[in-house]
Amino acid sequence: MYQVLSKRQLSDAVFELTVEAPRIARKCAAGQFLIIRADEHGERVPFTFSDWSAEEGWVRFIFARVGKTTHLLSRLATHDTIADVSGPLGRPTKILGKGKHMAIVGGGVGTAVAYPVARAACAAGARVSVITGARSADLLILQDELRALPLGRLQITTDDGSAGTQGLVTGPLAELCMNDDVDEVFIVGPAVMMKFAAQTALEAGVKTMVSLNPLMVDGTGMCGACRVTINGRTQFGCVDGPDFDAAGVDWEELMTRQSTYNEQERLSDAKYAHEVLHEVEARLAKLEAEREGSCSCKAE
Amino acid sequence: MQGGVNESVNPSTDPEAAAESAASPAAAAAQVTAAPAAERRRPSREPRHAMPEQNPARRSRNFSEVNLGYTPELAHAEAERCLQCKNPTCEGGCPVGVHIKEFIGALIADDMPASIDWLKKRNALPAVCGRVCPQESQCEAQCILAKRGEAVAIGRLERYVADWDCSRPVEERCFTAPAPSTGRKVAVIGSGPAGLACAGELAARGHSVEVFESLHTGGGVLAYGIPEFRLPKAILADEIGALERLGVAFHYNEPVGKITNARELLDEDGFDAVFIGIGAGLPLFLEIPGENLNGVYSSNEFLTRVNFMHASDFPTYDTPVWWGHSVVVVGGGNVAMDAARTAIRMRAGQVTIVYRRTEAEMPARIEEIHHAKEEGVQIHELCGPLAIEGNTGWVTGLHVQHMELGEPDASGRRRPVPIEGSEETIPCDTVIIAVGTKAHKQLVEITDAKLTERGYLATDEDGRTSDPRIFAGGDIVTGAATVILAMGAGKKAAAAIDEFLKN
């Protein structure tokens, strides 16, 4: 069992969990991920580290509440436990060093991964530009943390213009790649966002890496659920990645494979919503009974 | 016919033994546990007793065990068939050298505690082995009775005795206290059959053993690969519990190679030796077009989802699995049978196994092929997959080419040769690829010990790698093989580790 040390709600549907896992924390590197199984009935679900502390023995990850597991995780509180946390898994992100310019693009919750990559690149002495985008201002995450880094440039975009520049990350990215001497671009976010951002950077002739997010089960190369096609060859997202050269990625296949269980996921979500409703109703009924009970006690 | 065999090998007709027991009643009594058949025993001439099983129509609808196990009456009747040979050749056929004659002898004498004691002396996991070992090509193939008829059902008796032990309260079960602590520490990487056998052996010899497993429960392929209907999870949990009582510590969620490595375990964590038994878990694909369509699984993924993550109980369990009305499994080994039989139990309408050679060349156990067919699995032999066809990202069929058998290849099996113009498409919505596994490239993150050209760990016969403190055994040395061979390798390596630690 792994204890939740703290939970932070970053926006309406985005949460951050900090979990005690000292053995994992000593080995984490930017770009790697962990796999959690929330409880005995849980699915194994991968999350990329957003932060960790080897000294204090914790790891942290950020997630959007989209399905049953993330819903369940979002309801955990400090001192609650998670059945299983395994990691660090996957290969670390390649970090550029002194004299190099690394552009890092985070879309939505992907910014949670962009942040430690940017921090590592800064620490390695690279010049670092960050572009972070979201649908609206309330969905932007880790803004204070990003501002605290010695970034060359920090550009914010929102689809609705409620913060930063209105539009997609592709606009500022194209501009950056055209007008600046970017050595490498690193992109992380939803598949469709990565696809178009990568296209933008590649068109400008800049080497581009993407952090892919295929479905996984074991996360150690045993099952092959995370197969992705890179330059016509099958690779395993968990052990060969999660980072791949964007130029070779078969995006359509990735997105189709990600949708394999959409129907089952909806069923699972609905069932869970039903259970939560029952739980809340039972709790209310108990409170009501207690209130009535205490009244009658006084009467006696 | 059997009588002739009995004359030459049964101790009851051995004049020396007879004289000895007549002369010294005490010696005869002392012999009861070791060879209880020393009295003038006449082995039964009944035919081999069949294993009671769930009927196919019923079992194909549930995940409960297919083989129900012998009743006490059947077990005794089968044990009575054993000749109790002076030189039990069956024991030579066992990769871990189980004392077969003795455990069956005790069973004949109705001394169950002695029987399980004999069994556990050489095998830490008898309930598992009694179920999944290919006895027909090992101990039972060496049984004298097999020469003229049917071998004693050693595997079924092993299972009967082990299950009897498991049915007792924990505190009454067979338990041999480990040797006094040697103060030496061994790390075992991987909790599959090789690791479990190695851990049990080392713990019995008084070493402190810690097992590191990357998944959330133990057993490796026994947990994720072999389905519940062949090896119930409760049996595996029980065998792991027995190792824990022996003092073995299990660390789950520890992917060695990432969270630590062999060097760190040895140099920083105070382990005196490391055993690597991580198996060969990387699933092979056919490398044909369409293999990444939705609805294509490796057998590992399909079995892991259903069997290990309980997708059969979705949505009570959160892990989903997609399967359709028509499932095609590619391959002819035990894993292909397991996948096909699992699909049947998931209520797939039609399940077909596609294999390049004929049923006779299939590497699967005959019992598994037989069970699969009984449950409704169709077998298309002499059929080689060319491509997986799909529509909007989902599987619609398997394009195959028919074959005929040509000259034998290096493995001695006749090579399948394609027949020109025989291509056809088998319509299906799910394809499961069960054509084997290989070593992980990540092995180098665990150790820098020398590898073979094919990427497996190079060891000597006893599991010594190029690093004197690192040992290995099982599939990561030999390539994909059987549970019992991995256990045998784990035990051998344990002996080598023990010797290394003593010097």
Image (cartoon, grey):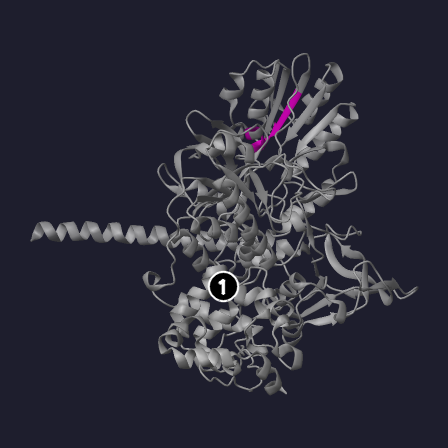
Q: Residue A104: say if magenta.
A: yes
Q: Residue at x 50, y 78 (%)?
A: B16
Q: Which residue is drawn at 47% across and 70% down?
A: B103
Q: Residue A106: say if magenta.
A: yes
Q: Which residue is drawn at 53% across and 37% down?
A: A87
Residue B301: give x, y in percent of width and height. 62, 53
SS category of the residue bearing label 1 = helix
Q: Tell me: residue B117, above or below residue A117.
A: below
The mark total stands at: 1
What is the magenta range? A103-112
Q: Tell me: residue A83, above or below residue A49.
A: below
Q: State left or right for residue A285 relative to residue A274.
A: left
Q: Tell me: residue B191, above or below residue A151.
A: below
Most foreground residue, B88 or B433: B88
Residue B503: give x, y in percent of width and height. 50, 39
Please give the residue where the numbered disc 1 appears in the rendered image: B126
Mark 1 nearby-residue class (10 Å; few <14, some 14–19, many ≥20): many
Most foreground residue, B65 or B485: B485
Q: Tell me: residue A181, above or below residue B315.
A: above
Most foreground residue, B122 or A53: B122
Can see residue B217? no
Residue B391: give x, y in percent of width and height. 76, 55
Q: State left or right for residue A285 relative to residue B130.
A: left
Instruction: Write down the quadrant of residue B35 in the picture.
Output: bottom left
Most foreground residue, A207 or B283: B283
Q: Which residue is drawn at 51% across and 30% down?
A: B267
The amino acid type of the residue labelled 1 equals Pro
Residue B407: give x, y in percent of width and height. 88, 64
**Quadrant location, the N terminus of chain B:** bottom right
